[in-house]
Image (cartoon, helix red, strand yellow):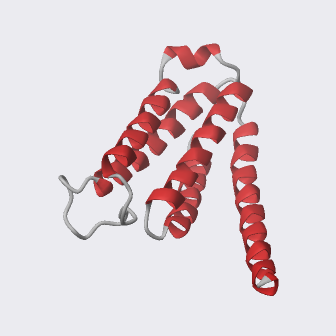
Amino acid sequence: MMEQLIPVVMIVAMVAFVLIKQIGKLTNKLDAFSGEGSFERYAQFSAIIQDHVRNIKLSLDSSKTPDERPFKLIEGKNEDEALEILSDFIRKLVFFETMMAKKKSAKEIEADLFELLSHLDGFLKEYCENGETLSDALRETLLEAYQQLD
């Protein structure tokens, strides 16, 4: 039994390491733009993330979407709970577009965005079929979108 557990632990550790490295790359990109126009950049990035979260929410909402959809709830997960979590993400992201966010330093905004993206990553893995794959794809998409911002 122990011989079977060791490879699983090793794989989980490797996946965690890769995830941390990918998130680190994203936050390093955020660090590079903590100058004058950084608030606008964070606001634009927040809007991009919001669009993705809204698409996930629409896809998970069985009352609004067709059967063929990219994000599907794992069987047994509470749909209302999942939709409420996504609504919370959207509410938090709206903050980055408001005047209130300008009162925070770039480091504070980066930390908040990092925390939110980490929770979104965890949400996809916990609530969605093929969550790991969906999470990886979203991370790559968001990184590319951030790199293309002016």
Q: How many marks?
A: 0
Does 10 appear above or below 39? below
Q: Which residue ends up furthest to the front in the rendered image?
A: 1
Asked which quadrant contains residue 115, the reply is top right
Does 12 appear above or below 33? below
Side of 118 where 35 appears, left or right: right
- The residue lying toward the viewer, choosing from 40 and 84, is 84
Does 72 appear above or below 52? below
Q: Which residue is drawn at 58% across and 33% down?
A: 42
- The residue lying toward the viewer, choosing from 104 and 67, is 67
Q: Residue 36: tell me if it is visible.
A: yes
- The residue lying toward the viewer, choosing from 114 and 38, is 114
Percent of width and height locating residue 146: 58, 47
Q: Residue 35: tell me if it is visible.
A: no
- The residue lying toward the viewer, choosing from 149 and 21, is 21
Q: Which residue is drawn at 72% across and 44% down?
A: 27
Percent of width and height locating residue 140: 58, 60
Asked which quadrant contains residue 2, the reply is bottom right
Percent of width and height locating residue 98: 48, 19
Question: Which quadrant of the figure contains the C terminus?
Answer: top right
